[in-house]
Image: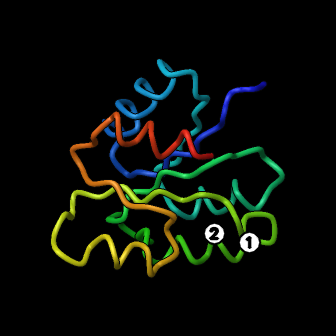
């Protein structure tokens, strides 16, 4: 069985580095984009992506705008999208889910919880 391929969308290269290192250590394959539009361009292709981790607060296009756009791509309606955000206030999880996220995880990331979520893909 091939490794699950995760697309990480985050404008902070440090977050991309940390997530990639963590996921690769657990046998995931990772690809990353620092802009939501670049991620949309990639997802519009036939590139194999098994799940998306998306930062909700990014310049230009945030996760709240990007998630519905991803879900509207013909080949990506059912892709699992996990919102990753430093916002951990009451109602933030629900806001992410309303935008179309499969699930929500707050920063700093609980690695065990992230791996449990990714084990469902």
Which corner quadrant of the image does residue 43 belong to?
Answer: bottom right
Which corner quadrant of the image does residue 112 belong to?
Answer: top left
Give the SS element for disc 1.
loop
To which residue does mark 2 refer? 70
Q: Quadrant of the N terminus?
A: top right
Calculate the distance from the C-alpha at mark 1 to the C-alpha at mark 2. 5 Å
Compared with 91, 5 (above or below) is: above
Give the SS element for disc 2.
helix
Which residue reaches farthest left? 89
Q: Looking at the picture, how far across and down is residue 48, in whole percent?
A: 76, 44
Left or right: where does residue 64 sit relative to residue 31?
left
Residue sitting at x 68%, y 27% = 3
Q: What colouring does the structure picture have?
A: rainbow
Residue sitting at x 54%, y 59% = 81
Q: Looking at the picture, how far across and down is residue 106, in whole percent?
A: 27, 54
Residue sitting at x 76%, y 62% = 44
Query: Label 2: how many residues lie within 10 Å, few (<14), some (14-19) or many (20+)?
Result: many
To which residue does mark 1 refer? 73
Which corner quadrant of the image does residue 80 belong to?
Answer: bottom right
Compared with 34, 70 (above or below) is: below
């Amino acid at each position: 069985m091939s490794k699950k391929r995760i697309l990480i969308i985050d404008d902070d290269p440090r977050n991309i580095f940390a997530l990639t290192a963590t996921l690769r250590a657990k046998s995931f394959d990772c690809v990353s984009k620092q802009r939501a539009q670049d991620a949309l361009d990639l997802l519009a292709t036939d590139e194999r992506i098994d799940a998306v981790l998306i930062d909700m607060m990014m310049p230009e296009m945030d996760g709240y705008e990007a998630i519905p756009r991803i879900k509207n791509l013909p080949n990506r309606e059912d892709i699992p999208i996990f919102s990753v955000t430093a916002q951990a206030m009451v109602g933030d999880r629900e806001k992410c889910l309303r935008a179309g996220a499969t699930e929500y995880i707050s920063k700093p990331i609980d690695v065990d919880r992230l791996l449990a979520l990714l084990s469902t893909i």
